[in-house]
Image (tube, grey):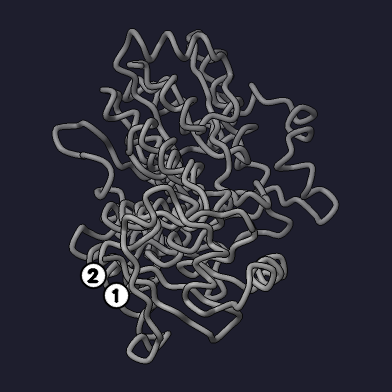
């Protein structure tokens, strides 16, 4: 599978595309310049930005040229997309500082050397526009009636949509036109909330330049319950280590829901899909190994391999120290006894955590049995040597406080 469109589709990135077959053919035949816009209203990117960043990296690895466009000019107005209120307006100095912070984080995934990628700021051309000329060249191609049907405007009409924000679609569309003229950019990519703006930009290029341009949007990075990923009790999961430590970043991914493992491995790592399928098919306590791989790969990519190793070691040590492992009872078991798997109910009796299989079955059904800190709901679960940590230990827990360590011989 060489075509990057197929790669993005297989991994679950693509939600919508203006002309699917044409885009696929374009990416097959040409070295395509494309862009994704980023709102520089914070001084760090967060987990929500990781998905478009990964898509850009896949595209670059396939020989295409990404433009990371910082909305320094549009941020002076504020994008109404996905908002029920007006965005806070920043000063040019704040926006420029945020842009410099973004560049450091983009460089973790993209190669900016020798014009292999660009980081641009739309303030460089939007701030120079003559309003009358802009209206005559761009504004005449936009129907107000059509603009008001766009989702980004419809949801703001009741609360009150300012004329300032109403200009946003024109300005983003002009970005696409400017990048087309100066860099030959033919494709804009972005989140689903940008669909109206993206297709307006492609349409503007068609009307003004008489050429084809394309748009594509990404699926949102959400949990299996439909909640945006990256939301923690402390706030957003930032990529800046000063805001979120590598350890906390690692722990977030280590503790995701089992149902989200395959999606996150597919979208947020470069692991081959065969390996992702293998890891995500692990069941019971073994799925924790897939989560460790996910957490390690992401922390290595965003922070460094050294930080990933430190976070992994700290997580394992803290987990064990938190359970006061020195006083936890231990049972040693011959690895041969697990060659065909041992019923968890039998292991619970062997360790003395339960006195009978019926007690074990009742505790599992009530959600009171944990293997490697994962609550078990399968009374038929079998434990194998694969469930044990690298140090050949497996921690069992009954209820909130009763621990038992099983050591493999």
Q: CA distance from mark 2 to mark 1?
A: 6 Å
Q: Is residue 21 above or below residue 244?
A: above
Q: Is residue 260 visible?
A: yes
Where does the image place residue 40, in percent across and percent down from the top left? 44, 55
Q: Is residue 217 above or below residue 389?
A: above
Where does the image place residue 235, in percent across and percent down from the top left? 54, 71
Residue under label 1? 314
- At 34% across and 24% down in the image, what residue appears? 33
- At 51% across and 80% down in the image, what residue appears? 352
Farthest residue to the bottom: give it.
327
| Marks 2 & 1, CB-CB < 8 Å contact | yes
Residue under label 2? 310
Please state, as top left, top right, bottom left or bottom right, where the C terminus lies in the image.
Answer: bottom left
- The answer to which of 61 and 253 lies nearer the viewer is 253
> In what element is the residue under mark 1?
helix
Q: Is residue 163 above or below residue 241?
A: above
**What's the mark number on residue 91?**
none
- At 68% across and 73% down in the image, what residue appears? 359
- The answer to which of 46 and 399 lies nearer the viewer is 399
Q: Badge 1: how crowded within 10 Å, few (<14), some, or many (20+)? A: some
- The answer to which of 236 and 77 lies nearer the viewer is 236
The quarter of the displayed image where residue 355 is located: bottom right
> In what element is the residue under mark 2?
helix
Q: Is residue 200 left or right of residue 350?
A: right
The quarter of the displayed image where residue 29 is located: top left
């Amino acid at each position: 599978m060489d075509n990057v469109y197929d790669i993005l589709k297989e991994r679950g990135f693509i939600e919508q595309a203006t002309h699917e077959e044409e885009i696929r053919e374009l990416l097959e035949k040409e070295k395509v310049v494309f862009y994704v816009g980023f709102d520089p209203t914070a001084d760090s990117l967060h987990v929500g930005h990781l998905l478009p960043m990964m898509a850009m990296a896949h595209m670059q690895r396939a020989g295409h040229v990404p433009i990371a466009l910082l909305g320094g000019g549009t941020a002076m107005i504020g994008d109404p997309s996905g908002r029920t209120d007006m965005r806070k307006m920043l000063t040019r100095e704040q926006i420029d500082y945020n842009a410099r912070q973004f560049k450091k984080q983009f460089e973790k995934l993209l190669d900016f050397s020798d014009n292999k990628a660009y980081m641009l700021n739309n303030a460089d051309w939007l701030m120079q526009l003559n309003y009358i000329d802009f209206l005559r060249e761009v504004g005449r191609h936009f129907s107000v009636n059509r603009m008001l049907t766009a989702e980004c405007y419809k949801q703001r009409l009741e609360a009150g949509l300012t004329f300032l924000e109403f200009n946003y679609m024109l300005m983003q569309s002009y970005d696409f036109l400017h990048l087309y003229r100066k860099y030959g950019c033919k494709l804009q990519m972005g989140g689903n909330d940008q669909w109206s703006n993206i297709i307006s930009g492609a349409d503007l290029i068609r009307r003004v330049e008489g050429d084809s341009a394309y748009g594509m949007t990404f699926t949102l990075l959400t949990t299996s319950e439909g909640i945006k990923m990256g939301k923690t009790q402390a706030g957003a999961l930032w990529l800046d280590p000063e805001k979120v430590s590598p350890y906390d970043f690692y722990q977030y991914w280590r503790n995701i829901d089992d149902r989200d493992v395959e999606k996150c491995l597919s979208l947020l790592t470069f692991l081959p899909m065969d390996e992702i399928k293998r890891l995500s098919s692990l069941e019971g306590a073994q799925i924790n190994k897939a989560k460790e791989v996910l957490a390690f790969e992401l922390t290595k990519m965003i922070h460094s391999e050294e930080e990933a190793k430190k976070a992994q070691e700290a997580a394992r040590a803290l987990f064990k120290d938190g359970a006061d492992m020195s006083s936890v009872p231990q049972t040693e078991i011959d690895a041969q006894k697990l060659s065909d798997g041992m019923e968890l109910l039998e292991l619970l009796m062997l360790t003395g955590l339960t006195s009978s299989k019926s007690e074990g079955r009742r505790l599992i059904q009530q959600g009171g049995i944990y293997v490697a800190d994962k609550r078990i709901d399968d009374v038929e679960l079998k434990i194998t040597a694969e469930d044990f940590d690298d140090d050949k230990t497996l921690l069992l827990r009954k209820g909130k406080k009763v621990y038992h360590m099983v050591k493999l011989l």
